[in-house]
Amino acid sequence: MLRRILLSCALLASLTVPLRARGASCGSTQYDCAVFYVQHQRFSQAISLLSRLVSESPADLKALNLLGIALTESGSIDAANNAFAQALAINPHFFPARKNLAINEFNQKHYAQAAPEFRNILQDAPGDEIANIYLGEIDFKNKDFTAAAKHYQAARAKISVQPSWLLHYAECLLVSRSVEKATAVLKLLPEQDSEDRFQAGILLAKAEAYRPAARLFASSRKTHHDAYTAGYDEMLMHVKAAEYAEAIGTFEDLLRDGHKTAELYNLAAEAYLNMNRVQEAYDAMRAGTQIEPESEDNYIDLASICLEHQEYSLGTDILNVGIHYAPKSYRLYIQRGVTYVMRGNIDSAEKDFESAATLAPDKSLPYLALSWIWIEDGKSSKAVSVLREKANEPAFDYLVPYAFGVALLYSGIEPGSPEAQEAIKAFELSITRNSKFSNAHSELGKLLFKAGEIDRAIPELKLATELDPEDAAPFYVLAQAYRKKGQSAEAAKMLAKVSELHSDEHKQDLKKQLIRLVRQDTTSQAQATP
């Protein structure tokens, strides 16, 4: 399809006679007759006639070019390229032959050979749209998106011939964050082209351009072979764009079309919660869990949303149902324990965290949660005792040594004491196991600052601010460290950031920290599950 479209363009450029059927006669001249044969896909007759013409007139450029086209269409690519090369040997500026030769090289994936041919065309005809398009395609394949975008832009009048060109051009624009331009390009896709509109929606979704992505999925859904997936993606984009009413509208459309899946009801529950329609959210959740009652991920996702919206009782109810169907899921016990914490029911929370530790003795999160309970209950020494044993076990990830360090801090250690050194080593071990964990860098930096080790503290605090720019605590301590070093300007910048974050506590609340870590851990576990 692609080759035929472009060779037709090249053919038209190389002919000087009208392309029309001539009744019983194929044409007034042998060349006209050859054109007629090519036009009607009678390639063997065209090749025979053109071969005689070229034999009689070896310098006939139009005959050589048309012979190359006929040979290309019949599948004799090498012979076709020889014909084009013969024409170019006679006249290097005969662009129809050069263009057809370059297109053949491209279609054979000989990109290194095709590119210079197209560039030669642009030297004399910078605005040639076909040459620009193909150079754009070559640059796109080489992931040189900036160069590709320039070539596509130069060929705007022709780029809508192939939907794949529009998609590639839009992808190049999205790489440079030109979302509005990319959206405008993708609007050129034919309305009936549901598959390419679906792919366009995926491109915009990856670029977090959720609103226009939703519109493309919506237009795709009408005729797409998988209307449910297109509809679900449309609904998801509405939710991500905070267009909750539109999301519910799509949800209702899909239900009317007979699509009833757990993931659909769960997404609807999220939309309802964001609209403060709690009862409808609960009803949607129950409908989803009845379809897939043993899927723990559904309960985890919904409980996380409840925590985010401070609907703690609803979160507990959801997790009660989940534990009924998946009684061996430590993640469900962890989540329910957190909802109990937020409701002030510490005893029930501790029991759930202990159950999680029993179900998953090699997982870190239950011990992190238990350490929080013990610290809040004034039992820091118990947390220290349990976690000291676990922290160095290789089976545990970065959370256990981190929790051990925090427990030591809350036990009332003094700077420079053996316990303080133990806490430093615990945070360093946590960082060794996960160098991207901002909390460990932050706590290590604060501890080093208190010990007077300013030069060691500053890099840890700076890294903490880079990894989590929303946490005010490391910014505040970093300001103090800069002040100690006499760097007043840097200190002022850090304090301005603290003010921007609207935090005057200068330390992270353990409860908020627990919720965030639980959310991160349960989400990563869900993604890792096959």
Image (cartoon, rainbow, N blue to C red):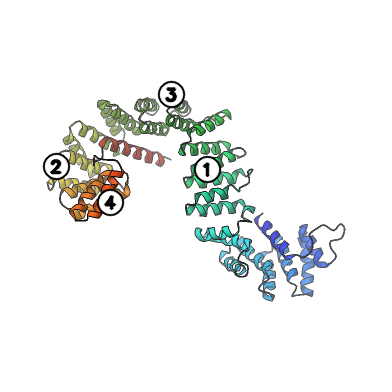
Q: Rounded to the nearest whole Å, what is the CA distance between mark 1 and mark 2? A: 54 Å
Residue for badge 1:
213
Inspect the image, locate mark 1, and give the three-letter code of the amino acid beneath it: Ala
| Residue 10 to residue 218: above or below | below
Q: In this view, does 274 lie above or below 155?
A: above
Position of the C terminus, as image quadrant, is top left
Name the residue beneath numbered marker 2.
413
Of 389 and 250, nearer the camera is: 250
Q: Which residue is drawn at 55% across and 40% down?
A: 215
Give the image quarter of residue 254.
Answer: top right
| Quadrant of the image occupied by residue 115 | bottom right
What residue sits right under mark 4 in the picture?
A: 493
Give the class, few, some or many, for how many residues have Cα within 10 Å of label 4's Cα (few <14, many ≥20): some
Q: How crowded is mark 2: few (under 14 residues within 10 Å), some or many (20 or more)?
A: some
Residue 172 % position (x, y): 51, 55
Q: Earlier in the sequence, mark 4 or mark 1?
A: 1
Q: What residue type is labelled 4?
A: Lys
Residue lying farthest to the right in this orientation: 24
Q: What residue type is labelled 3?
A: Gln
Which mark, by number, is residue 188? none
Judged from the image, the secondary structure of the residue bearing numbered disc 2 is loop
* Label 4 residue SS: helix
Residue 192 rendering spot, x and y as whole percentages: 64, 43
